Amino acid sequence: PVNDAPTLDPIVDFQTIAEDSDTTIVLTASDVDNPELVFSAMSDNEAVTVSIIGDLLTITPEPDHFGSAVLTVIVSDGELTDSDTLALTINPVDDSPVVASSIGDISVDEDNPELTLADLDTVFQDVDGELTFEHSNDNEDFLTVSIHEVTHVVTVNFGDNENGTANLIFSATSGSSTVTDEVDITVHPVNDAPQLEVSGIPPFETTEDEDLNILLTASDVEDNPLVITAVSGPFHGTISTAGSDLIYSPDPGFVGNDNMVVQAVETGVEDPLVSNQVIISVEVFSENDAPVVTSFDWSVMEDGSTEILLQGYDADG
């Protein structure tokens, strides 16, 4: 007897499937001499794999792959073979974007400098192409958010002396699909040092033995109570406070220049802070003091006369 070649039943010429899907085909063949036939297959596209178990052909493209492939199916009786080809088309499917690397919540201290939060091209991924990014911010008075048009880097700027929490939601859209990543930013309060200013331009002037009122402005962001203290001086007088006024009292009879350095200090807080130091110079001018006669007792006989030596002094000379 002569061994006859097996005959592979025709396979459909074209097969179309969607990206990220596979398909199976039942193979049939006949052989007048040998019913024990073996099927095999191959693909001209390495991104498309084929496997056969028994008479079942399974076609599996790699994830996110689309395009075409030519598959060859072979049947063998151990000596002779028959084959057929199949043209496979894999149609692309719009994949939804995904969060590849979530940003995570952030905590910073008050008055933090500009913060580079994330690169959205790293946070989100889409195998099909470019994404469109947007964001929402539930506390725009507290902080501002910007996304660079080209690099898609997110920058956060904080308000001066602001603390609290803001919720940010970033979204990436591809076609009709959108995915989001949510971030909470917490800014912890930090005690700010007070500020001290003096009104007017020194030197401040007064006359001998006259008090001088100097207007000071002390402020504190947290509204902590403040007191004014001398760091050095004055050297020819004393100071006291009355409301926002610093009162300089020159020593009795002092004429000339005096100076002092003052600052504001927080009170009623665990770790009080001090303000900037302010230098105050004072010029005390002389004043013409009235002369003073020295008092004395004197006696004289009736109808008599005498000479009296008068004594007095003048502080100005």
Image: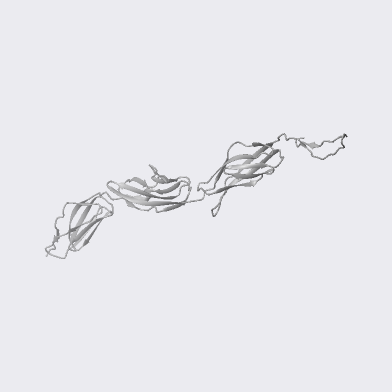
Specify the quadrant of the image occupied by residue 217: top right
Pinpoint residue 65: horizontal percent, then vertical percent: 27, 51
User: Does residue 61 sit above or below 303 in this rendering?
Assistant: below
150 to the left or right of 237? left
**186 or 267, which is in the foreground?**
267
Here the colouring is: one colour
In the picture as drawn, the residue positioned furthest to the front comes out as 302
**214 or 261, which is in the foreground?**
214
The residue located at (59%, 42%) in the rendering is: 245
**The N terminus appears in which quarter of the rendering?**
bottom left
Q: How many marks?
A: 0
**73 or 296, which is in the foreground?**
296
34 to the left or right of 304? left
**The C terminus appears in which quarter of the rendering?**
top right
220 to the left or right of 5? right
Pinpoint residue 191: horizontal percent, then vertical percent: 51, 50
34 to the left or right of 159? left
Pinpoint residue 180: horizontal percent, then vertical percent: 33, 50
The residue located at (19%, 61%) in the rendering is: 56
